[in-house]
Image: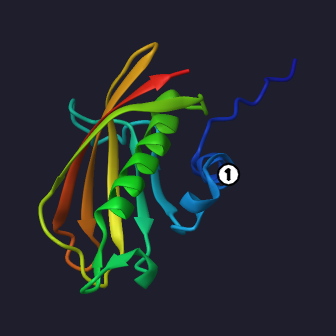
């Protein structure tokens, strides 16, 4: 008797969803998924959370006066990153919608890629709660903290 091979939802699946599900203007941000954490590594502690790390490359089109990456782009990046983190927590794609997002901007990002470390803090049957830390890729220092809630549809 042959054993059926079980496939797991992985980074390639998440990249496919990123390219197929989001609005065209979100795709214009040129986001990439650098890490996709579905299961804890062996050395993970009890506070491990599923999620993903994404990159938003620097573009002058995302800047306001003075070469500062605008808050609107950072908030869209955080929101999109939490959707990808939810894919990791659900281990599949589920339609969802943002219910709430609170962003605390800590410092400006000038002429640098931005990283998003998005984690699902709690995943329920109908709701998901998460946090995103946005970091300057130049020095890995935080630029914003974001908390969010999503309704699973």
Residue 28's spot in the image, x, y percent? 57, 68
| Left or right, residue 115 beside residue 96 | left
Residue 129's spot in the image, x, y percent? 32, 28
- Determine whether the residue tagged by mark 1 lies in a helix, strand or loop: helix
Q: Residue furthest right?
A: 1
Q: Residue furthest left?
A: 106
Q: Which residue position is annotated with label 1? A: 16
Question: How was the colour assigned to the protein in this rendering?
Answer: rainbow
Q: In the picture, residue 71 is in which quadrant?
A: bottom left
Front in this rendered view, residue 66 or 149: 66
Residue that appears at 59% across and 29% down: 95
Residue 31's spot in the image, x, y percent? 51, 64
Front in this rendered view, residue 1 or 40: 40
For the N terminus, which image quadrant? Answer: top right
105 in relation to 86, above or below: below
Residue 141's spot in the image, x, y percent? 16, 68
103 in relation to 7, above or below: below
| Left or right, residue 146 beside residue 152 | left
Residue that appears at 24% across and 86% down: 66
For the C terminus, which image quadrant? Answer: top right
Packing grade of label 1 (10 A; few <14, some 14-19, many >=20) is: few
Front in this rendered view, residue 153 or 136: 153
Q: Residue furthest top?
A: 125
Front in this rendered view, residue 83 or 9: 83
Residue that appears at 25% across and 65% down: 135
Q: Residue furthest front?
A: 65
């Amino acid at each position: 008797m042959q054993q059926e091979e079980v496939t797991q939802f992985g980074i390639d699946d998440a990249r496919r969803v990123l390219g197929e599900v989001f609005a065209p203007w979100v795709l214009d941000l040129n986001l990439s998924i650098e890490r996709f954490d579905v299961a804890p590594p062996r050395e993970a502690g009890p506070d491990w959370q599923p999620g993903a790390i994404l990159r938003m490359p620097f573009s002058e089109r995302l800047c306001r006066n003075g070469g500062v990456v605008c808050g609107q782009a950072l908030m869209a990046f955080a929101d999109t990153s939490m959707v990808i983190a939810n894919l990791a927590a659900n281990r599949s794609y589920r339609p969802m919608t943002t219910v709430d997002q609170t962003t605390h901007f800590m410092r400006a990002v000038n002429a640098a890629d931005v990283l998003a470390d998005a984690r699902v803090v709690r995943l329920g049957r109908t709701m998901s709660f998460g946090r995103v830390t946005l970091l300057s890729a130049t020095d890995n220092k935080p630029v914003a903290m974001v908390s969010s809630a999503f309704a699973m549809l």
